[in-house]
Amino acid sequence: MSTPNGFPQHSRVCLTRSMEGGAVQDLQAKKAGKAAKKEAGGDGAPPKIGTPISETLKLLPEELKANMKIKSITPRPPRKPRLERAASLDEKSWRKWRRFRTSQESLTDPNETSSSNGSLQEASPSPPTRGRASPCNPCCQQDSSHSSPDALEASPGGKSRGGASDLGKRASEISSAFGGLLRGKGFAGGKPRLSQIMPARPLPPMELNVASHSLRTANRIDADCLDYRHYSQHKFGRVSSSLSDSRLQGNGTLYDNCSTDSMKSTFSVLTPIRAKDVRSRSYLEGSLLASGALMGAEELSRYFPNRNMGIFVATWNMQGQKELPANLDDFLLPTDPDFAQDMYVIGVQEGCPDRREWEIRLQETLGPHYVLLHSAAHGVLYMSVFIRRDLIWFCSEVEYATVTTRIVSQIKTKGALGISFTFFGTSFLFITSHFTSGDSKVNERKLDYNKTIQALTLPKNVPDTNPYRSSSSDVTTRFDEVFWFGDFNFRLNKDRETVDSILNQNPDTDVSKLLMYDQLTSEMSRGSIFKGFQEADIHFRPSYKFDIGKDSYDTTSKQRTPSYTDRVVFRSRYKDDIQAVKYSSCPVIKTSDHRPVFALFRVKVRPGRDNIPLAAGLFDRDLYLIGIRRRATRELLKRREQKDQRSSSICSIS
């Protein structure tokens, strides 16, 4: 049922307020409030529009209790506001109640946000101005019990109706009522309240953990430094305020546990170290489980959480050519794996005359992330070991030895070169060899192998990680992981015409028919050579013999049979420690009659002891600087050429 003015008789009450200026207006307001209270208690007439809103709200619960009917009336226009006046008592009570209401909203309304968003969502707590009154929004309903802030202040001990439990509920209802008023147009002098912006459709789910398992995490917190966050928070007071995990999560930032742990340092992202730990931490203790050991399990897990490292092993017979390839990226940095490897080992047979130039080119290609751990040569046999610069501190002293299989020759073109060292607690041996050539000289090649494993005197000073499984007659048994690569010169026992027909039938990767005639595969199956070694599956064309600069096999009068002379084999003391990831050749390098052959491995690494001869970060500094300088110069020249090419114009005259 509605009144003639269109307002519901029992459901809505229009609440307005006019502020009286000066002491006289305040006295008149109090008198009008008393008169309205008496009139309401007698015949149930509605309160006058000039009654202060605190007095009006104070009457509502009693009216509802008496089940009295309230009639809505048309509000009268208020008086003209005074321009300059002091704050009245009603204004002061309004501001005091406003602060109380804001605190109650933060406790009762879960949808309200913090002060950072409140400036956009609610109006400023200024007292209402005396403007033109308009009909109120349907937010003040008769059936909802309201209590005024005056009544709340009058009963601080919870003596109002409903007890202490109803106090919060009634305050929430008052907040809802005045929130509706603030959203309306009744207060022309206040700032408009903007509604909360919600998306038109639900947002798609987002994966928070973006950590990649293949990436290493070098900034994890030590187990003995887990309480560093609380210590630094108490001491410096910066961790929780600037880089706390809760702020990262609350802002929707993509994060993972590793990244947040690394950010907990007060000064940098490096692993924090206490001063007392620096005093007490002692290296060279010789214990695998010692806290803070340089080669121990904690340090290993920081750099290799899954304890697997990537190794690139390559072999190439350069045929003694002076000319080096213009670009080695396709050779050292193939595009198939997404990430570069942790270690690069390159063996060369019949190397170029300028060995230093070759090493500079390797450093230039690998870039500043890698350093030359060691390089050695035996005649025209070269080997270079590059490692990531972050890992150089965990290497032992590097040792090498050589074996000559052709004593008569003054130029050592045939023989073997071995380099060994210990990385954390895993010992490595890399051997590059050049065996006797000739299609039918299989026995001579087996003799070269036997002489190498007996005469290669390694290790020298670095202790064996497992001497109980070593043999004095076989150098490959004295190391945990062994990689043997080179020009082994094993051929295919088939004529040229048959091999060509097989290659023409399967031009891509199906070379299983060719491997049926491979000498090395046959000898390894018999156990006469490379005992205990394995080789990854071959899916590339024979690496020998090509016409220089072309993709065609030997077209000279000798018509040599294409063969898999360049190979990479491996063995391990422990089962499944070495896993072959890729085994292929590099057909784009055509400066020799051999194609480079490379293999990618995943190798398990174990923690070690500190009481071994350490390399202590030793690397070829001069080579590093020259290679990086050349790399920068090449990049600048490339950019200049591109700039000149864009700015130049070509005119054709017809």
Image: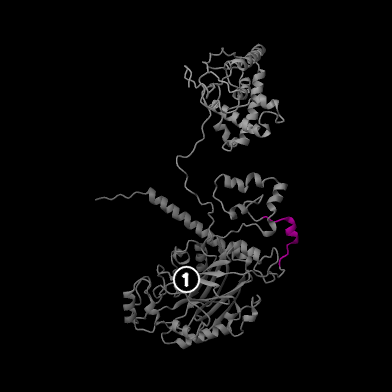
Q: Is residue 569 above or below residue 204?
A: below
Residue 551 appears left or right of 571: left
Q: Is residue 71 above or below residue 397?
A: above
Q: Position of residue 173 (x, y in %)?
A: 59, 30
Nearer to me, 572 or 125: 125
**Rendering quarter of residue 154:** top right
Q: Which residue occupies 66% across, 22% down?
A: 93
Q: Position of residue 386 (x, y in %)?
A: 55, 67
Q: Position of residue 232 (x, y in %)?
A: 70, 49
Q: Position of residue 336 (x, y in %)?
A: 44, 64
* Residue 640 in sight here: yes
Nearer to me, 81 or 153: 153
Residue 281 counted in the magenta span:
yes
Q: How many marks?
A: 1
State the colouring used for the structure image: one colour
For the record, the magenta segment spans: 272-283
Residue 601 counted in the magenta span:
no
Residue furthest out toward the bottom: 443
SS of the residue under disc 1: strand
Instruction: Look at label 1 and name its amino acid.
Output: Phe
Residue named by callout 1? 598
Q: Which residue occupies 39% across, 74% down?
A: 541
**Rendering quarter of residue 459:** bottom right
Tell me if mark 1 has few (under 14), some (14-19) or many (20+) residues whose alpha carbon lies within 10 angstroms of its own: many
Q: Which residue occupies 75% across, 57% down?
A: 276
